Image (cartoon, rainbow, N blue to C red):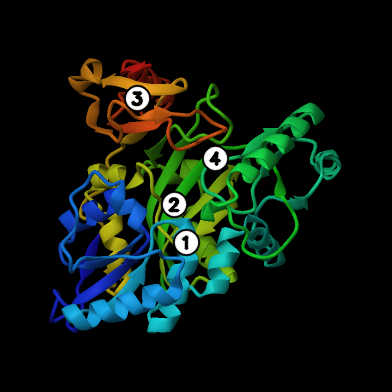
Amino acid sequence: MGAIMDEKQSEPNKNKVLVVGTTSDYIEWIRKIRPGQALFLTEPKIRQNATEPCPDNGEEILCPISDIESAVQALNHHKKTFGVILSGITCFDCESMETTSILAEKMGLPYPNIEAVRHSRDKYISKLLWRQCQIPCPRTCPVNTEIEVLNFLDQVTAGIVLKPFCGSGSELVFKCVTRRQCDTAFNAVADGLAARTGNPLFKPTDTGTFQMLAEEWIAGPEFSCDFLMEKDRAVILRKTRKIKVDSRPFGTISGYAICPENDDDEIMPSNEKLSNLFHRAARTLGIKTGVCMVDFILRHKKPVLIEMTPRPGGDCLPFLLKEAGNIDILGLTLDAAQGVAWKNEKKRPYSPLVAFRIHARKNGVLKSIKTDAVENDSRVKKIHLIHSPGHRVTMPPQDYDSWLLGHLIIEPNRRKFFETECLLLAKRIDIEMD
């Protein structure tokens, strides 16, 4: 994608995008690829636990981001001390979006308002708004008891999905087809939410008393896109198909495959139709600007929206886009926050690559992870490991983060039915646990 820098940015070292509450690996990525473009507002515990180099004093402010008053004071002090001009604001983590919205309003910077953020984070409210505007999405029902879950199952005979109102990825998400599965899943979600009471990712967006959401299960392949919201259109930046492996917990994403650009019409609606749908759906939630992510399922070749949020896709996706198309989605998000003009073009077409995640297979302490067996395989383009020996793994549903050990970027030999090929490659990685 080409980006045209504003002429107003005559002092690139002074104009900064405030990045609120992101992780240390993202901070290091941005510092390397976009040096001097960002100012980071970071939780102190993130920096304390980081293995990456510490940014210079002028690049980062350490402050509990939920303490808005302290954050504003720290920002004002930093601006005076270093002569910084904030020209944009963004965030890459769902749990930091509300703080980002409040800070944006206080500083007069463009970002979705608090209502739009809450609409997107709340999986019930977002679908309620979409259904009111005839935007295709699953039927839902807030539930407090197992009886309410079973009553909804009676209405949706193909199956339901139980999940928290707010959350991310596959965490505490269960598919239920039988009454017994409903009982088991209800207790698992209830126990999981009780154990995550202090986790801001699962903090409800209002004071509602419902514990969880029951949602219609939609059969079909699942996709994920990034797009840029403009005044009258959504510019699609990425289309990827989610890879799921039956042996892993329901909802677990094993990887992402770049969608072929030359035969999309055989798989899904045209970019124009998707763009119009995404734009309508985002505006319905109150999102008017920035890079967004959307998940959807194709049911009879028609998209059914599952989730949308005003941030780009994370996990291994930025690595996949960099390798497949030399696209830096984190940098592009900074550009969008600064109001940089876009042209809907790429430097080169995406290569048909796959990002396949490396998961631990059991609880324990990581003793070693050896990738020798795949390093010389011509299909493997990159190997990215995120944990060293000594890392403790707790498997789902107790923990959905620690079992992820990294990912492979793969160019499969086959364009279709490549999932098994990727799974067999990943199985050749030797993971020893104590």
Q: Do the residues under discs 4 and 1 have CB atoms within 8 angstroms? A: no
How crowded is the residue under tag 1: few (<14 C-alpha within 10 Å), some, or many (20+)? some
Q: Which residue is mark 2?
A: 225
Type of residue at label 2?
Cys
Q: Which residue is mark 1?
A: 275
| Quarter location, residue 384 | top left
Residue 322, image x and y in percent? 25, 47
Mark sitting earlier along the chain (2/4):
4
Residue lying at 24% horizontally and 15% vertically, measured from the top left? 373
Closer to us: 15 or 103: 103
Mark sitting earlier along the chain (4/3):
4
Q: Which residue is mark 4?
A: 170
On the picture, is 333 further left or further right than 203?
A: left
Q: Nearer the viewer, mark 4 or mark 1?
A: 4
Residue lying at 46% horizontally and 47% vertically, measured from the top left? 224
Residue 14, image x and y in percent? 17, 78
